[in-house]
Image: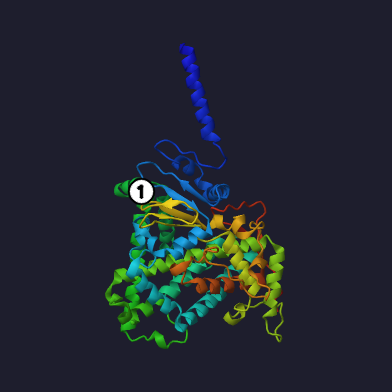
Amino acid sequence: MASLCYCDILLVVLCFLCLLFWGTRPGIPWNWPLLGMLPSLLRKVRRIHDNCTNLLGQTGGTFLLKGPWFSNMDMLATADPANIHYIMSANFSNFPKGPRFLKIFDFLGDGIFNSDGDAWRNQRRFAQLQIGHHRFHRCLVKTSQDKVEKGLIPILEHVAKGGQVVDLQDVFQRFTFDTTCILVTGYDPCCLSSELPDVPFSKAMDEAEEAVFARHVVPQIIWKFQRWLGTGQEKKLSKACKTLDHVIAKYIAMKKDALSNGINLKEQEEGVDLLTSYLQEDEMMGGFKSNDKFLRDTILSFMIAGRDTTSSGLTWFVWLVSTHPDVEAKIREELKSVIPEEEESNKWRLFKAEEVGKLVYLHSALCESLRLYPPVPFQHKEPLQPDILPSGHPVHPKMKVMFSLYAMGRMKFIWGEDCLEFRPERWISDRGTIKHEPSYKFLSFNAGPRTCLGKEVAFTQMKTVAAAIIHNYHVQLVEGHIVHSESVQVAFIILTGRPRF
């Protein structure tokens, strides 16, 4: 009898293990008692984007991930454009950033990306006016062209002549860090130079972002306990915030001092940075001029938005083009087509803003790269009130709704059977113009009232850099180098591909 009981117990254990490791469908997380699906998610966190794509592909585009019972970590993952349109536009007021978002991104303070309601609307209105102003556009064009000519090109020339391997992700991050800092504060940290120096401001941003990513995965009670103890990623975040606060405070003080000494940047032909605009247009901001905390939060928010998104987009773009020689050839031909007839089309040159604005195929290739490798691969929201999404899934307050932009670019029901192909032509209309895709389908620049204010800034910088590299160089991926979607660190060899005259 005892042996029979042992056999029964063994059979139950074996059945449980079979369910645990195989489940009903491969790729579907096992829902553990008490722990929910967290162990399965942590086991797959290194390939989280590909695993999420596989999961959503098997479940019709939407799936409820159960968190531990004590954690309020239930999360509805979706790649359904109908759900995203509903959340981001149709019922926007019921899906603010929410208190959990504010806790995770608390180091950003009360800036535009953390704000909701009237505070967000006021900040967005003013930021939109300044970013859309011709003074800022002049600053954008000059900054981008100068940094390409005096910062990026010397580094590429150096590695090309020496036959060296270079991590372009690092180079592009330095480029966008410098340009974003100039556009936002008016000061150049000189991160992009031949010495490739360690810049404390940039390093602090890296460490802050790593801690924020950990907060998305680890239960709130755990990371808050780590913060209380001063250990782990929370210790790094605390140290990083001190560096960020110190550097930004220095920039604000320098700018106030410059303006008080009679420097009128409004009259400069080179344009005006955002910090200058915020300080000079104090009456439009309701007295924020003396509020250094607001300026700090605003500067940091714009720095985070401008640096990583553009550098990530450029890295994946160059990787895709380097592995698709047919696309590279078409971009080169298009670049030649905008060069004035009196110039030799094979001569080494940089491209002006009005020239890159005519490059339809280059623009479409950038869009296609952003579709497959969005710089921000996921977003999340929380409903204020119970609701039912168009997919039929109920949501309630304290439930996180996460949409995977990475998975959306790989869904056949969204982009067709060739969704995994890098095909820029899908973005070109029959008339030869850029084809508009709804923002809730192509979410790289957000959607609805929170559509990214810096979309044109990003495209201007990316096209300026891409045109300079593709026309003047040939980029090769290091043979045998493995690239993962979770990391955009890619090793390249830069070859001088154009004759010199």
Placement of 408 over or under 299, stated as above or below: above
Q: Whole-percent x and y of residue 91? A: 42, 63
Q: Nearer the viewer, residue 171 or 448?
A: 448
Q: Please rate how many residues cluster around mark 1, counting C-alpha atoms within 10 Å: few if below 14, some from 14 to 19, many from 20.
A: some
Q: Nearer the viewer, residue 201 or 209?
A: 209
Placement of 212 over or under 65, stated as above or below: below
Q: How is the image coloured?
A: rainbow
**Residue farthest to the top, as pictured:** 1
Is residue 164 visible in the rendered image? The answer is no
Q: Whole-percent x and y of residue 300? A: 39, 66
Tell me: 347 left or right of 263: right
Is residue 471 visible in the rendered image? The answer is yes
SS state under label 1: helix
In this rendering, the count of numbered labels is 1
* Kind of residue at badge 1: Gln
Q: Whole-percent x and y of residue 140? A: 49, 77
Which residue is denoted by mark 1 in the rendering? 220
Quarter in which the C terminus is drawn: bottom right
Quarter of the image holding residue 184? bottom left
Residue drawn at x 47%, y 11% is: 1
Q: Nearer the viewer, residue 21 or 106?
A: 21
Q: Nearer the viewer, residue 139 or 363?
A: 363
Placement of 41 over or under 466, stated as above or below: above
Q: Whole-percent x and y of residue 69? A: 37, 41
**Residue farthest to the bottom, as pictured:** 267
